[in-house]
Image (cartoon, grey):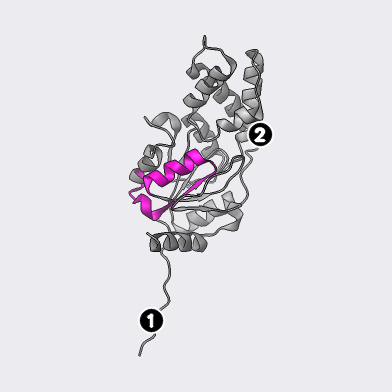
């Protein structure tokens, strides 16, 4: 009798990456920009306030800032322009602080022929600066926060990325460092690998927590996806 070959989990159809706090540790850049801007506006800021913005759309963050400091004479769009300009300047003049294990996993995915998408609340100008600093072919597509009608936690950003890649979200893995982003990935149907950075991420169905991207590889991700599907 011919022995049954061992089950080999299929690798993900695609890997979908958040940017701020997941691929790159840019949250300190945003927080520094917030402190600088709010100080110039005569307001007071705190790390507790800053952490409330992690994972939010930039317009929502701009509105939060104006409400927090009582500057209703300004617009959220103006605040976003100020913050984005400062962060872009930092990205273009210094080394991007990539998260541990992120670049190695991106390269392994490229060599294995697994497409990757960058899906972020940040605007196109920031994503282009980041993508330009990576090896060619690192990302097959990208979706920026100013290119969707409904940002995270709505599933639209990840649904759009899957549509552009021609894959089913349930066959994909999303990497996120915030609850807002994790909710978006789960709502799209993907398995979310949460890598908490500055804020905790609660457990949820089809959501796995890891301490670092350096702790995962493509075979491990395939097993996670296989196990998640087995429990559906």
Q: Mark 1, mark 2: which one is toward the viewer?
A: 1
* Residue 76 percent location from the top left of the image: 49, 19
Is 49 on the left or on the right of 106, as rendered? right
Nearer the N terminus, badge 1 or badge 2? 1
In the rendered image, residue 202 lying in the magenta stretch gets the answer no
Q: Quadrant of the C terminus?
A: bottom left
* Residue 162 percent location from the top left of the image: 36, 46
Q: Label 1: which residue?
A: 4
Is 66 on the left or on the right of 29, as rendered? left
Residue 92 seen by the camera: no
Label disc, if present, on residue 211 of the rendered structure = none
Q: Quadrant of residue 200?
A: top right
Q: Label 2: which residue?
A: 94
In the rendered image, residue 185 lying in the magenta stretch gets the answer yes
| Residue nearer the viewer, 137 or 41 | 41
Residue 48 seen by the camera: yes
Looking at the image, which residue sits at the far bottom? 1
* Residue 73 percent location from the top left of the image: 52, 9
| Residue nearer the viewer, 192 or 122 | 192
Distance between mark 1 and mark 2 Cα atoms: 54 Å
Q: In what element is the residue under mark 2?
A: loop
Residue plotted at (44% across, 55% down): 114
Q: Residues within 10 Å of mark 2 (few under 14, many from 20)?
A: few
The magenta region covers 164-189
- Please tell me whether residue 114 is drawn above or below residue 2 in the rendered image: above
Q: Residues within 10 Å of mark 1 (few under 14, many from 20)?
A: few
Residue plotted at (57% across, 49% down): 102
Residue plotted at (43% across, 76% down): 6
């Amino acid at each position: 009798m011919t022995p049954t070959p061992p089950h080999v989990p299929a690798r993900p159809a695609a890997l979908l990456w958040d940017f701020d706090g997941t691929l790159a540790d840019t949250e300190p850049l945003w927080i520094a920009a917030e402190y600088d801007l709010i100080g110039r506006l005569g307001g007071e800021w705190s790390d507790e306030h800053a952490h409330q913005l992690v994972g939010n759309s930039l317009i929502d963050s701009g509105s939060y800032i104006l409400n927090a400091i009582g500057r209703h004479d300004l617009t959220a769009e103006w605040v976003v322009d100020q913050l984005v300009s400062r962060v872009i300047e930092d990205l273009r003049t210094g080394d991007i602080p990539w998260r541990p294990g992120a670049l190695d996993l991106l390269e392994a995915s490229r060599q294995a022929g697994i497409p990757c998408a960058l899906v972020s609340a940040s605007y196109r100008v920031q994503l282009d600066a980041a993508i330009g600093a990576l090896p060619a072919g690192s990302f097959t597509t990208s979706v920026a926060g100013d290119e969707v009608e409904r940002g995270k936690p709505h599933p639209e950003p990840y649904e759009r990325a899957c549509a552009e890649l021609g894959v089913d979200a349930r066959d994909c893995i999303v990497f996120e460092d915030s609850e807002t982003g994790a909710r978006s990935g789960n709502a799209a149907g993907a398995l979310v690998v949460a890598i908490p950075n500055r804020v905790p991420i609660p457990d949820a169905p089809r959501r796995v927590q890891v301490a670092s991207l350096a702790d995962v590889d493509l075979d491990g991700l395939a097993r996670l996806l296989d196990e998640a599907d087995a429990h559906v």
